[in-house]
Amino acid sequence: MSQTHGRRVLSMAGGTLVSRLTGLLRVLVLAWVLGFSPLADAFNLANTVPNMLFDLVLGGVATATFIPVFVERLARDGERRAWRSISVVVTAASLVLVGASLVAWFAAPWIIDAFTILNHAGGHAAAAVADQRAVATSLLRWFVPQVFFYGLIGLATALLNVRHRFGSPAWVPVANNVVAIVVLVWFHLVDPAPTVASVAGSSHLALLGLGTTAGVAVQFALLLPSLARADLWRLRVRLDLRDPALRAVARLGSWTLGVVAANQASLYVVLALAFAAGGSGPVSAYTYGWSFMQMPYAVVVVSVLAALTPQLARLATDEDHDALAERLRFGLRQSLVIIVPATVTLIILSQPTVAILLNHVDARRTLAAGTVLAVLSAGLPGFTVFQLCVRGLQAMQRARDVFVLYLFQNVATVVLAFVLGRHSLAGLTASVSLAYAAAALLSLVHLGRVRTPIAAALWSVHVRRSVGASIVAGVAMASLYALGSSMTGVGLVARFVAALAGGGVGYLLVVVIGARRVAQRPPTV
């Protein structure tokens, strides 16, 4: 099982790595084209809303319920009856997506107003904010169809994962990123110095919005061949409100909907406070920092969790708590061994990373996106632990427990955001990291109470070795970076590369020496 799991993780990790690298390139191009400006904030705010709406309407429910329910139906009802039920769920979800997209299109002005309500600018600044809201509203209406396509992608991914096909969902986002990059480059060519005033009401703005949404549509279209090869021809358009699978999704999804609502409420508070902070693109700084922080998590942890989820669902259905705990501990060890050094690297090199990638290789001033990246990265281990614990509880269909944990995390985020972040982007970001750390500890305790203890994996030999190696790597990176003084151009890049290489060598030396010491120990009797 471990070898099969490893192959699946490697397949997904490869696709996820390429998709995240192209996603990173997409962020770089976006920053190159729009910079840290009011137009960039309007674009990033409008482009974030469809993801929030998708999560609120279906995304969280799909992740938490579809795979466990589908696996349970296939295990208990047989193929024919199970696919009737799965068809009902897919049909109902598609109808919900259509309705949500239509509502969001009509409600676009009020949605944007809600995000910008905390900005109390007056005079000329008030007029500028009004223009920014108008551009964000226009973009949001072009982006709204993404809700429908993201929903279809989520459904397709769940169906493919049930059939143990993980590769294509990990690779198809590459096409989305490529389309978006092409659209952004085209936009730059037709408007090299765009502003809110220059794009308002123009055809260029419409094509920017339409092109960005086209990337999501292409991403879904590329999943169709995989769906056809995965023996999913049994799907039919079928609606039966009494179907047991639909009722199970509704039962579990009611709690999950509460989870997603809490998530989006806290994200709304964070983005609204960021927008109210003013300055040079605070929403964009938070968006870019979050994207960079998510890179190691998305490449490693998402791949591990996607491969583990069907196994966890099967073990939970069989009520094999010992095996379930073992697989969760295995996943946690795999994840933390990579996440810990990534965390140290992102914290120490956050400013030069953002300066090189987003600020034209210029680190002469402290960049808000770099500060956001460092503070969010400090919370990355807690975020990882929390997400893995939640996935285990979802596999056990303990939706109420998941809701309580997420409610705690989001309430903590909101409270800390108002305490620490009303006048500081760093404080606002810290509220997110601190809340995830606290929620991770609480979720570990709760898993132990439900006969699935996994906390021991936090201090396994592999994790301890990774922590020690990461400390050595961090000291090496900080020392090597401090030796130089160049803040721009080739000199800054040389400082960054030297620090990164020195940290990598230090990490590998500690890991290799530790492994040799373990191998040389005499066997215990």
Image (cartoon, rainbow, N blue to C red):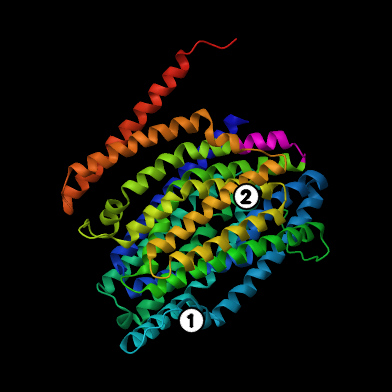
Q: In which quadrant of the rendered view does residue 126 lie?
A: bottom left
Quadrant where the C terminus sits is top right
Instruction: Name the residue at 39% across, 50% down.
Output: 21
Task: Please give the residue where the numbered disc 2 appears in the rendered image.
Answer: 390
Instruction: Name the residue at 42% across, 47% down.
Output: 18
Q: Is residue 32 left or right of residue 385?
A: left
Q: Where's residue 446, x and y in %?
A: 67, 46
The residues tagged by marks 1 and 2 sit, at their Cα atoms, a distance apart of 33 Å
- Which range is magenta? 318-329
Q: Can the viewer see residue 201 in this picture?
A: no
Q: In the image, is residue 324 part of the stretch drawn in magenta?
A: yes
Amino acid type, mark 2: Val
Q: Where's residue 211, x and y in %?
A: 42, 69
Quadrant where the N terminus sits is top right
Instruction: Name the residue at 50% across, 38% down.
Output: 10
Q: In which quadrant of the rendered view does residue 324 lie?
A: top right
Q: Where's residue 182, x and y in %?
A: 35, 63
- Please determine whether, in this image, residue 371 is positioned above or below residue 310: below
Task: Please give the residue where the numbered disc 1 appears in the rendered image.
Answer: 113
Along the viewing direction, whichever of 293 and 157 lies nearer the viewer:
293
Tell me the crowding category of disc 1: few under 14, some 14 to 19, or many 20 or more residues within 10 angstroms, Cα based: some
Q: Where's residue 245, x and y in %?
A: 78, 57
- Please determine whether, in this image, residue 397 is positioned above or below residue 123: above
CB atoms at circles 1 and 2 under 8 Å apart?
no
**Picture disc at residue 17:** none
